[in-house]
Image (tube, rainbow, N blue to C red):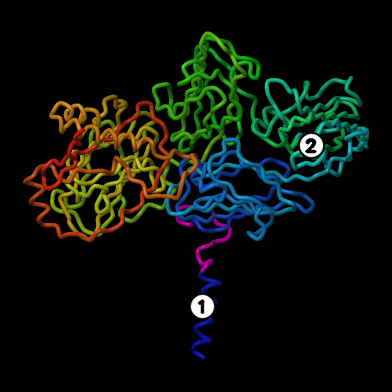
Amino acid sequence: MKRNGLISVIIWCFVSCSFVDRVIGQTCSESNKRNTEALPSATVSLQSYSSPGWRVTYYPEMDCQWTIGASNGFRIMVDVREYIIEDGEGADCVYDSLRFYDGANTGAQVTSVCGTARSGRMFVSSGPAALLRLTSDYSIQQAGFTMRYIMTKTDDHGGCGTATTLTATTNTVQYITNKQWPDSYDENSLCRWTITSSSGGKVSMTILFSDMLSGEECYSDTLEIFDGSSRTDPSLTQGYFCDSRGTFPSRSSMTFVTSGTQAFIRFRSIASGWRRHGFFLSFVDVQGAVTTTQAPTTTTTQPPNEVCSSGTVQLTANNDTQLIQSPSYPIFYSPNMLCSWLITAPTGALIQLKVIDSYLEDTDGCVGDYVHIHDGSNADSAVIATYCGEISSSVNSTSNRLYIQFRTDGSVGQRGFQLEYTVLYDYSAPSCAPPAGITNLEANATAQYFESPNYPDNYNSSSTFYWLIHNPSDTGYIRLEVEDSRIEADPYCTYDKVTVYRGPCTTYPVLSSFCGVEKPTVTQYTGSYVLVVFTTDATADFRGFRIKYYVTTEVEKTSTFWRDVALIAGATIAGIAAVAIIVGLAVAAKRGKLPGMKSSGPKKRRLSVSSLSSSSSSSDESDKESSNKRKRPKTALRSKTKVRLPPVKSAKVETLPKVSIKGQSKLPPIAKK
């Protein structure tokens, strides 16, 4: 009897305990990172969604699922525009992955992806339900994914081979697609449809989605809509239409209305092997002017801002999707131009900037034509992205302002670029729940201080302390200068340490980490918040630290690392050997895995050069304090999460401390030839 009862408990736990942390209908967040969330139902209007922490980092050990539903008879097309997910070994995605399931649950997986894809992937369900799932392990969290989705159906109404006549009605929205939509097509075809109003009114047509081979000219796949019954009538699309899904939508309106009772649609594709998807178009009869019975438009995109003058173009970001494009886009831009745009969002909001098309002169180091994106109000703000050629970067601001500068040299004009911007929820404001006992500090131009608890007496064991520093102004950077530091030391800061995060939550990238007697200077160039966390274990307490903080507009130009190297290099031959070791460590650290690069093997623990610390400041202090410490058993090093650090205007190299053993400098012997 007892045995049966035990088996019942085990079965109950297997069924119940496995799902105890999965919450239905709540948003995936740091505190709730194993749940299933229902996204708004798919419609014939494009809707967008990004994974939590997009462009910063998703969460460790997460398992979030998003379900999407649609009307019966329709399918769901999910267009993952970009993803940056930790790469696995080969195609297995054994670490982190984004999976797409063809249905409302995880029973029928279609595919999984990881690594980096700037142009994303497209998934199409076979019915009116789909599910996406993002999972991660304990280390190396990257940026996540951003996507859009739409309700679609295969309904080509013939038209290919023989022209087809259709009738538009006022009560029912109908659809036209190319053959095989929404699956990829690869064929040489010519399709034609003539649409006639049933009431004697006008015909309204909306291009709901497009994925063709676009470029400077529409030379492969083309869609044309005419205001009449043949190609000799006026063109409503003003020529050929051929937006790819990367650039769609590129116009302020995708709805076209006839002046009479008929419309003629022509789609032509060449067997080019590009494996595009084609188009999805709706049509309806509207009596007189366009009314609410017309098919919904796919976007709220505003007309593009393409002004280039001696002044900066002032733009305001809102919930609508707006466009910026280079002058004359997609016609070649002119030489010797300097164009700039300042985008401002409401206070407390961020700006999301997406590069949807880019073709600039390609030069090494982008010394010819280039685009600079500054995280702030002007060209003196930190540069968070620079691009030229066909390589581009999509970014989020860390404040409510983003400054864009486009410069061309005296030769080689190209097609230019098109950018898309909108308001983003404020990731720079604390979205995580503040931990108990956090100390809130406000930085300004005046130097202020905070210290470890009990300083200069010994700090407490087995504790964690938090300080959140905020720069409320729109200018300047938060700078921390460690004026005194005596924290338990070991080469990897495994026991007690101070960690500085590049944002208000511990899910943000690590800006710096130190222990021992190291006294680094740390500057936050890309945001208005810095989180300082001091963690201690159960043994070996010391006096702690004292840190000065303030707001500055100065960018560090002289690296303390190279000052230390210069001092050591002026010593002896042994000192030169030490320099070689230190430089080797720095080069090795700089050659670490960048976001999106494929892993060459199994995941390994990684060590950060900035985490190395000095074990003592003098032989007397070291001998005195080391005598008070008991010996520790050998333990495995804690794995450190590798994070993405946004580029800054002047790269800062953290100070490498001197490493000593029992107060004496130890250098490896020089091998004899």
- Assess whether residue 28 is covered by the magenta stretch: yes
Instruction: Point out residue 338 in the picture as x, y percentages from the top left corner.
Output: 50, 14
**Up/down of 432 relative to 193, above or below:** below
Magenta residues? 18-32
Q: Residue at x 63, y 19 (%)?
A: 329
Q: What numbered label is drawn on residue 281?
A: 2
In this rendering, position of residue 435 left or right of residue 213 = left
Name the image quarter holding residue 502: top left
Pick out the residue farthest to the front.
673
Rounded to the nearest angstrom, the CA distance separating label 2 from label 1 is: 55 Å
Q: Which quarter of the rendered picture does the C terminus lie within?
A: top left
Q: Nearer the viewer, residue 379 or 257?
A: 379
- Assess whether residue 258 is covered by the magenta stretch: no
Q: What numbered label is drawn on residue 10?
A: 1
Q: What kind of element bears circle 2?
A: strand
Q: Residue at x 63, y 41 (%)?
A: 121
Amino acid at the residue labelled 2 = Leu
Q: Nearer the viewer, residue 530 or 471?
A: 530
Name the image quarter holding residue 163: top right
